[in-house]
Image (tube, rainbow, N blue to C red):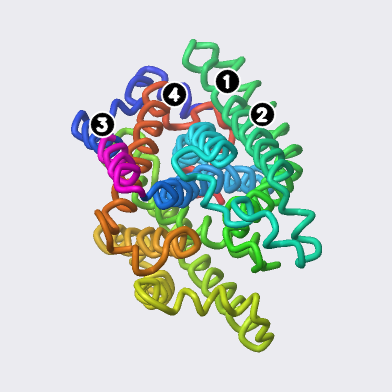
Amino acid sequence: MSIAKDLYKEKESLFLKGSPTLRMLSLVGIGIGVIAAGAGFFTQQGPRVWGSLLFNVFFFYCLGLGAMALAAMQDVIGATWGRPIRRVQEAFGAFVPVSSVLFVVFILAVMFDIGGAGKVYRWIADPHMLDHFWGKNIWLQPKLMYARVFFILALLTYLVMWQLRLGINRDKAWLDGRHEEAEDLGEEVRVKTKYWSAPILVCYGVGFTFFGFDVMMSLSPTWFSTLWGGWQFAVMMQTLMAALLITMFALKSTRVGEFIQRQQFHDVGKLMHGFTIFFAYLTYAHILTYWYGNVPEETEYFIHRLHGPWLWFVYAIPLLGFVVPLYLLIPKWAKWSRTWTITMSAIILFAQWLTYQLIVQPEVIKGEDFLKGIGPLLEVGMFLGTAGLFVITFLWFSRRYPMLPVADPLLEEAVHGGH
């Protein structure tokens, strides 16, 4: 606990006040999102607005849930390398309750067909379209789907908040000057999280898979993928590593950033590189399997996306999400060189944002309607709104809690190069 005692005199430096400019930009982003949604409803594009909300919230929800899953992975094996960035992951996780509320709003809008939301899921708008699809006509029942989504959101949100509460409580004792109690709590939490992280990861994996089945895959009700859960995980973790790297560089000039060493950048960069390959592997496995199976209900999903504006997404995603980072992240320095690494991370985030859009929007609107009205500005505006809300949540968390887990008994080892 020597680091914790040394830092006590400068504990205020461990809180991030955030620049007024960043807060203002976040609020402006939220305002743009509201205006974009309003413009979409005004131009009679309600389903498109709800589709944009769905994939944008899902994008940032994955950052939060993925961060807490990564924290649980480190806890269950007792890894030390990520302790200096543990609170960054928890700040990402703070968005899970916020995004869960947005998902609840979305589902309620679908239930009561508010603003055209009832048309987002074709099988809800036309219940008889699945009459001849045995199994699907049982699973895809509106009331059952709503109940599953609400239950999964509640369960995952509870587990995330439980994780957050454990880490925060031990630091609260440290902030109050109760160092011995903080040390005891730190060890108690380490043992508890090591024991409970494995079942929590099971809940995350199963819950996230079925959640993705219901809110994303069921947009195309006659199509299905047994790889969907693993593929979602690959996308989630690749984008998480990219977002973590950008945030780590942003913190580098702060007191907290002094504890984020080259080791952490290298490890997160290697994970980003690895999940780039994993994402490409599972994507190829999808396409190859459907290609040689040649079942109309399955191939139609991909053929539909090879027409109109969606074709450009199909070209951009593998290039920006796989080919470019695959080769340009090979050198060691590519994981910790500020300009290079941030650029690669931004490219990956953009590519996977296109991926989520390619999943949702072709099922909600026709290709020829994509450029009508305000066009893609609607999706971009909704992204800026959700991103602004994500950043505001991050800043709120970082002002309330120290951004270094000072009472973590493994922090000392991590600072001295431990893995």
Q: Which one is in front in this view, the residue at disc 3 or the one at disc 4?
A: 3
Q: Amino acid at mark 1?
A: Asn
The mark nearer the N terminus, 3 or 4, is 3
Q: Amino acid at mark 4?
A: Tyr
Q: Are marks 2 and 1 in contact (CB under 8 Å)?
A: yes
Instruction: Give me the C-alpha separation between circle 2 and circle 4.
Output: 17 Å
Label number found at residue 401: 4
Q: Which residue is mark 3?
A: 23
Q: Which residue is mark 1?
A: 169
Image point (52%, 74%), residue name: 280
Q: Position of residue 391 (x, y in %)?
A: 35, 37
Using the image as rendered, state which of residue 248 and residue 152 is in the foreground: 152
Can residue 250 be seen here? The reply is no
Q: Secondary structure at mark 1?
A: helix
Is 300 drawn above or below residue 237 in the view shown? Answer: below
Label number found at residue 189: 2
The mark nearer the N terminus, 3 or 2, is 3
Label 3 Cα neighbours within 10 Å, binned few <14 / some 14-19 / many ≥20: some
